[in-house]
């Protein structure tokens, strides 16, 4: 589906933040991802028209980075870290419990499009290993039980906006350090919540 | 020389330009460093690592890619050390991990850099026992190019070419890591005028041409260098032939002209040579296409000329003849004029079949430029027909010059396709739809900034067939008064300059039509031209030919013109004849013969010779070489003549610049048509293209262009298919919207089928036809 005027206006605002139109490619791909849960070919055409590069050039970038999804994700993207620090702190059992609950293998999405599960490389929360991200909002110090509870909660509550603080409070354990600035914004759908491009969402 | 520095390579000293890359400096001194991704006409990327060499650094020896490292004074380089060899082996072993071993069925085998370098520098054995990565075997990425992703070694030559050189990046790397592949966007094929170049520079068999697939093995090919007729740039090419069939044309790197690149038309327009539609014997058309011997036809023609009462004899010439052929024709006509009998020939005239012919800038007044001046000028001015469609390789040179910082100023709306390259685009506010100035030249915004006291190369030609030429002269005069001006005369078609240099006085098709006097006895020769198609004068020429008493066509195929001929004489073309070709900067290059003459066809000059003999006109030549030495006598600089001997010297393979007196007599046109701009597209319905199956479909779409204001406003169309109506003609066409066009202008490609019957001076009407969906056209 092609983009509506409001989205195009937002895209144009973002483009104006850069000296060269094509530099806005990254953020615009996030807008596309937020819209559909993946980068659709229609969005690629829109972006290509907006910033004046060819569709295949947009596709090239979109398919290179793993945070731009080529297939639609579920409402909640569960990214469980499998890198070294988490591995040492038994991320295996966290992975197993998430997999068990959702019934998903790596990169799979359930039919109701609630969860997408992926194993990822280090998410920069080694001090609080094992760590998980839900729609790119980080929870640290998880246990298999807590991660199970978290999945159940997500499934029951279906929160519109995921906020790291809230997850941490409810399900987290040891934290790597105190995230100095209190941040109550989070993300909706499988896109990181960025203030400057408007993907950060206020939880009411 | 002070601008040279010394570096040490493998123990011996070589000199190099400062700032050169190590790989280039070594190459210039004859030291070859293996490479896949580096190409001297493109920016380096350091993608493949095959070019690793050892250099000495303050911290000891280090391996560096020689294609991204520049030389410096006293740099010590080793290209053959054990470490380098080990690195090369390693790189090759990695490249071969996923490369399929399908060389026996690969088009590239035998001329494959990967194959050759594996032989020369490879490890000899593979340690890889796992499964190779698999992709679907070749997928078409356009009508003429196929891509086998398994074979790709990710050198990025093709993607860089399409981005940097041709400027239509429709192929890119998709995915990452082991899955990386070159591909197009779905439903957005690699439709580029230059796509064939990627096949030539791909270092493996990943990109192949549909026209050459499985046709030959490189070691079976016979090769010869030649010059392409595709445009008047005169691209240097290599013709590849096997079993007397042309199978492939490759670009050759001529520093002065195409620098190795070709347009797809120049590369793939050759299958017609072997079409079974080629005419191979003389044909008497008006006698139910009876085939004749050469002798019989020559008898008929000479009788016709000698027995007609004071005939007007006209020659409508095309642009694919060699200089020698034009010269022989000129000689024939000279002698014809001398024949004295009771029926003396009353007039003879040469008309060049090119709607864009005008008097141009020759012989004194202004200094003429060369293509290479694009690289040294400060400013490039473009006032001409669509460069990308008509002089595709010149477009590449302009694009490159702009990339290197030259300022491009474009006048008018014929070059909308390259608007984004221009510093200033002087469109409808400056010139009218028919190229007349709207403003005083000194008031053109920013013009003086870019020209005053600057080195300016102006590419100047008639932009539209119907334009009044006074504004061209006005512009040139203004430029000349304010800048150091050089002019590149923009005549776009094949060997136009050869015709101009070797025919005494050349006129245009409009002259043919207006001078045609049906009350006289008219004998018309069409020589390698098909003026009843592809010209804005086609419909009038058709009438004139019908009214003519005797028409002789020298051609390769039956076409719209030969339908009206009395006699068709089969001739030879590109690859089948030897001769010289003169490009738009008056650089003369060699065209070589590598194919036998089909059937009983003769070279054009042979017909003129036989005809002369039949008519007892004295001729003193018997071969191309003799013609060549005769025509070489009237070059202006007689120290540097483009004779066969000179052109075959290794130092002259890039051609020889020289000039001759040129006389063009084209009258200014006073009728204009502000609604329609007639243009020539790269692909059309020429006999050569429609008889080349690999590219014939590229010129088949019929479309017109206009901007959306015109589309919705003036014509109130709401359909992408419209009917174009003029008097009794109606043609169904697609509409392409081009926002760079001025209001109220329709652009019509005259070289696409169906447009030749339009009267260029009259209006057309448009009516919405049913939409494509309604018509269920796919
Ligand atoms: S297709 Fe050929 S030219 Fe293009 S990246 Fe692959 S190997 Fe290089
Ligand atoms: S290893 Fe898991 S967050 Fe760094
Ligand atoms: S040629 Fe230098 S890295 Fe490829």
Image: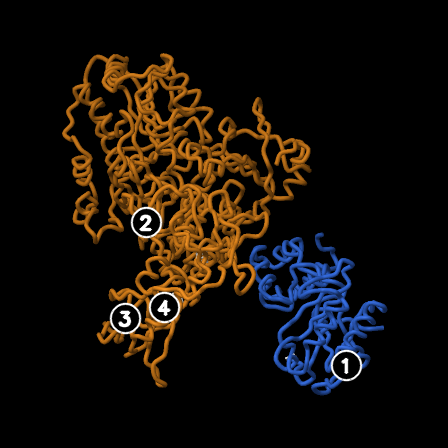
Chain colours: A blue, B orange
Disc 2: host chain: B
Q: CA distance from mark 4 to mark 2?
A: 58 Å
Q: Is residue B407 above or below residue B670?
A: below
Query: In terms of secondary structure, where does tag 2 sit?
Result: loop
Disc 1: host chain: A
Whether residue B156 is visible, yes or no, is no
Q: CA distance from mark 1 to mark 3?
A: 64 Å
Q: Determine which residue is flagged by label 1.
A: A172
Q: Nearer the viewer, mark 4 or mark 2?
A: 4
Earlier-in-chain disc, 3 versus 4? 3
Query: In terms of secondary structure, where does tag 1 sit?
Result: loop
User: Is there one chain holding both mark 4 and mark 1?
Assistant: no
Disc 3: host chain: B
Mark number, residue B366: 2
Mark number, residue B633: none
Q: Residue furthest front?
A: B129
Q: Determine which residue is flagged by label 3.
A: B16
Question: At x 31% / y 52%, what residue is drawn?
Answer: B254
Tell me the crowding category of disc 4: few under 14, some 14 to 19, or many 20 or more residues within 10 angstroms, Cα based.
many
Is residue B777 found left or right of B373 in the rendered image?
right
Q: Determine which residue is flagged by label 4.
A: B89
Location of residue B689 in the rendering, given as x and y in whole percent from the top left corner: 42, 35
């Amino acid at each position: 589906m092609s983009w509506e005027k409001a989205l195009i206006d937002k895209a144009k605002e973002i483009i104006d933040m850069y000296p060269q139109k094509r530099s806005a490619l990254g953020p615009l791909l996030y807008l596309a991802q937020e819209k559909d849960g993946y980068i659709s070919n229609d969005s690629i055409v829109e972006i290509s028209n907006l910033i004046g590069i060819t569709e295949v050039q947009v596709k090239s970038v979109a398919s290179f980075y793993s945070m731009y999804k080529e297939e639609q994700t579920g409402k909640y993207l569960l990214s469980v870290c499998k890198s070294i620090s988490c591995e040492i702190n038994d991320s295996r059992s966290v992975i197993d419990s998430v997999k068990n609950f959702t019934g998903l293998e790596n990169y799979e999405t359930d039919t109701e499009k609630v969860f997408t599960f992926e194993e990822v490389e280090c998410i920069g929360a080694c001090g609080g290993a094992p760590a998980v991200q839900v729609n790119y909002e980080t929870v640290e110090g998880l246990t298999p039980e807590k991660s199970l509870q978290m999945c159940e909660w997500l499934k029951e509550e279906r929160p519109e906006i995921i906020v790291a603080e809230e997850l941490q409070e409810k399900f987290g354990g040891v934290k790597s350090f105190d995230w100095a600035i209190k941040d109550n914004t989070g993300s909706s759908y499988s896109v990181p919540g960025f203030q400057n491009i408007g993907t950060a969402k206020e939880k009411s | 020389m002070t601008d040279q520095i010394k570096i040490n390579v493998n123990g011996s000293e070589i000199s190099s330009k400062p700032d050169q890359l190590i790989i280039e400096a070594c190459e210039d001194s004859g030291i070859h460093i293996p490479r896949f991704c580096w190409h001297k006409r493109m920016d380096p990327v350091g993608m493949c690592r095959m070019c690793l060499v050892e250099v000495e650094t303050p911290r000891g020896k280090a391996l560096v890619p020689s294609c991204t490292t520049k030389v410096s004074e006293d740099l010590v380089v080793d290209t053959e050390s054990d470490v380098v060899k080990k690195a090369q082996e390693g790189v090759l072993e990695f490249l071969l991990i996923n490369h399929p071993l399908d060389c026996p069925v690969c088009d590239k085998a035998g001329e494959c850099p990967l194959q050759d370098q594996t032989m020369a520098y490879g490890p000899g054995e593979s340690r890889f026992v796992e499964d190779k990565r698999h992709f679907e075997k070749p997928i078409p990425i356009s009508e003429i190019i196929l891509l086998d992703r398994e074979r790709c070694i990710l050198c990025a030559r093709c993607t860089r070419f399409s981005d940097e050189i041709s400027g239509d990046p429709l192929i890119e790397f998709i995915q990452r890591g082991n899955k990386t592949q070159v591909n197009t966007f779905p439903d957005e094929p690699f439709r580029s005028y230059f796509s064939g170049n990627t096949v030539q520079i791909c270092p493996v068999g990943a990109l192949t041409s549909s026209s050459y697939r499985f046709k030959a093995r490189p070691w079976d090919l016979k090769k010869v260098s030649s010059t392409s007729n595709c445009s008047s740039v005169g691209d240097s090419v290599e013709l590849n032939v096997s079993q007397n069939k042309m199978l492939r044309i490759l670009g050759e790197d001529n520093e002065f002209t195409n620098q190795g690149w070709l347009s797809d038309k120049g590369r793939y327009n050759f299958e017609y040579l072997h079409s079974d539609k080629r005419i191979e014997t003389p044909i008497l058309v008006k006698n139910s296409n009876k085939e004749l011997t050469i002798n019989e036809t020559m008898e008929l023609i000479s009788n016709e000329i000698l027995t007609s009462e004071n005939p007007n004899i006209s020659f409508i010439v095309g642009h694919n003849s060699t200089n020698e052929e034009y010269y022989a024709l000129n000689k024939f006509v000279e002698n014809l004029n001398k024949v004295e009998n009771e029926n003396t020939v009353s007039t003879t005239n040469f008309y060049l079949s090119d709607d864009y012919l005008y008097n141009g800038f020759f012989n004194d007044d202004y200094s003429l430029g060369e293509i290479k001046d694009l690289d040294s000028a400060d400013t490039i001015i473009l006032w001409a027909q669509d460069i990308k469609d008509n002089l595709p390789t010149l477009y590449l040179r302009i694009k490159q010059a702009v990339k290197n910082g030259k300022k491009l100023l474009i006048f008018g709306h014929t070059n909308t396709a390259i608007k984004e390259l221009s510093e200033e685009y002087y469109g409808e506010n400056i010139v009218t739809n028919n190229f007349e100035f709207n403003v005083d030249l000194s008031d053109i915004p920013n013009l003086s900034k870019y020209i005053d006291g600057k080195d300016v190369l102006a590419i100047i030609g008639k932009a539209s067939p119907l334009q009044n030429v006074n504004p061209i002269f006005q512009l040139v005069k203004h430029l000349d008064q304010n800048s150091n001006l050089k002019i590149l005369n923009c005549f776009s078609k094949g060997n136009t300059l050869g015709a101009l240099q070797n025919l005494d006085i050349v006129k245009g098709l409009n002259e043919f039509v207006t001078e045609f006097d049906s009350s006289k006895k008219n004998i018309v020769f069409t020589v390698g031209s098909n003026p009843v198609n592809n010209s804005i004068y086609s419909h009038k020429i058709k009438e004139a030919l019908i009214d003519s008493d005797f028409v002789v066509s020298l051609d390769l195929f039956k076409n719209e013109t030969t339908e009206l001929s009395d006699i068709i004489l089969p001739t030879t073309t590109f690859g089948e004849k030897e001769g010289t070709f003169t490009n738009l900067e008056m650089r003369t290059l060699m065209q070589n013969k590598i194919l036998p003459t089909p059937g009983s066809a003769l070279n054009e000059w042979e017909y003129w010779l036989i005809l002369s003999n039949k008519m007892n006109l004295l001729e003193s030549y018997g071969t191309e070489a003799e013609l060549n030495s005769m025509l070489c006598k009237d070059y202006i600089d007689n120290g540097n003549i483009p004779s066969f001997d000179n052109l075959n010297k290794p130092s002259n393979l890039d051609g020889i610049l020289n000039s001759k007196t040129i006389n063009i007599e084209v009258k200014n046109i006073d009728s204009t048509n502000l609604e329609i701009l007639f243009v020539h597209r790269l692909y059309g319905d020429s006999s050569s293209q429609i008889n080349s199956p690999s590219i014939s479909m590229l010129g088949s779409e019929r479309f017109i262009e206009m901007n959306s204001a015109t589309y919705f406003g003036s014509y109130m169309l709401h359909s992408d298919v419209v009917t174009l109506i003029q008097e009794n003609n109606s043609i169904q066409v697609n509409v392409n919207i081009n926002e760079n066009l001025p209001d109220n202008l329709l652009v019509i490609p005259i070289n696409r089928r169906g447009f030749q019957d339009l009267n260029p001076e009259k209006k057309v009407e448009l009516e919405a036809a049913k939409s494509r969906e309604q018509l269920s056209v796919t």
